[in-house]
């Protein structure tokens, strides 16, 4: 009898077990989703700061001279370089700005080598420049932008447009006013960093710094 009973009970047990496992999976999926907002942190993003310096010989791949590329922005010099991906995203962003009648953006700085940063550091007053290796500009994935002949970039409609739209093109304002305690760098309204659209959208929506996003 016992043997026959087991034959009839087993398929029911298997079905119940399968249902329980499916239920746990679905529950886990929704709990996980609500905790992370459905976003997977992009660990490939390069973090550079005082405690995460780049080596002396770090030079990003695929640097391009913006002056030699089609560009919907102005340049303060003819020798400003960014990585190709960063350039493409910046070009798309400033072309969109132009379509929205936001003009006059001038990029004043991009990639800076370790050696150049060492010169900048040596020429600056203490606390005004990053040590060589500690500048994000060595990544080639950020730029400084302004509008010529204005007192402060942060007072312009061009600044407001960037704050609202930069994430759609993969850029974040890297050094916000209220986050200097975390970034170690005081407010830089002109400095934008390329991290990709997904990460930029998440970072902007949650008012994070790159340090907070990467948990470092
Ligand atoms: Zn900068």
Image: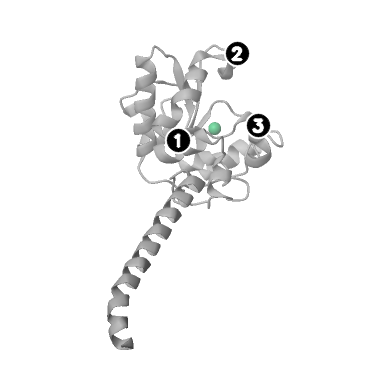
Q: Nearer the viewer, residue 112 or 107?
A: 107
Kindly report which numbered mark, 2 or 3, lies closer to the viewer in this rendering: 3
SS at mark 1? helix
Give me the residue at 53% from left, 48% from top.
Answer: 214
SS at circle 3: helix
Which residue in the protein does label 1 denote?
201
Query: Front-most of 139 and 18?
Result: 18
In front: label 2 or label 1: 1
Which quadrant of the render holds ligand 1?
top right
Q: Which label sits in the foreground, 1 or 3?
A: 1
- Residue 63 in the image: state x and y as whole percent: 38, 40
What distance separates the C-alpha of mark 1 from that of mark 3? 19 Å
Decide which of 122, 100 is in the foreground and name it. Answer: 100
Q: CA distance from mark 2 to mark 1?
A: 29 Å
Say which residue label 2 marks: 151
- Within 10 Å of the Cα at label 3, are there few (<14), some (14-19), or many (20+) other Cα atoms? few
Q: Residue at x 42, y 35 (%)?
A: 170
């Amino acid at each position: 009898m016992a043997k026959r009973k087991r034959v009839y009970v087993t398929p029911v047990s298997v079905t119940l077990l399968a249902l329980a496992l499916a239920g746990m999976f679905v529950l886990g999926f929704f709990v996980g989703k609500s905790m992370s907002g459905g976003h997977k942190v992009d660990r490939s993003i390069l973090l550079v700061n005082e405690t995460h310096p780049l080596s002396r010989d770090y030079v990003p791949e695929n640097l391009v001279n913006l002056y030699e590329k089609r560009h919907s922005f102005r340049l303060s010099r003819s020798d400003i370089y960014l990585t190709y991906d960063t350039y493409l995203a910046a070009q798309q962003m400033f072309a969109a700005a132009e379509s929205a009648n936001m003009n006059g953006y001038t990029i004043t700085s991009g990639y800076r080598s370790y050696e150049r940063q060492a010169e900048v550091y040596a020429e600056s007053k203490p606390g005004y420049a990053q040590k060589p290796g500690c500048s994000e500009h060595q990544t080639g994935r950020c730029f400084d932008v302004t509008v010529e002949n204005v007192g402060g970039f942060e007072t312009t409609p061009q600044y407001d447009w960037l704050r609202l739209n930069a994430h759609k093109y993969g850029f974040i304002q890297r050094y916000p006013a209220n986050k200097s305690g975390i970034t170690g760098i005081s407010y830089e309204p002109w400095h934008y960093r390329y991290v990709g659209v997904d990460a930029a959208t998440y970072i902007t929506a949650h008012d994070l710094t790159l340090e907070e996003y990467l948990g470092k």
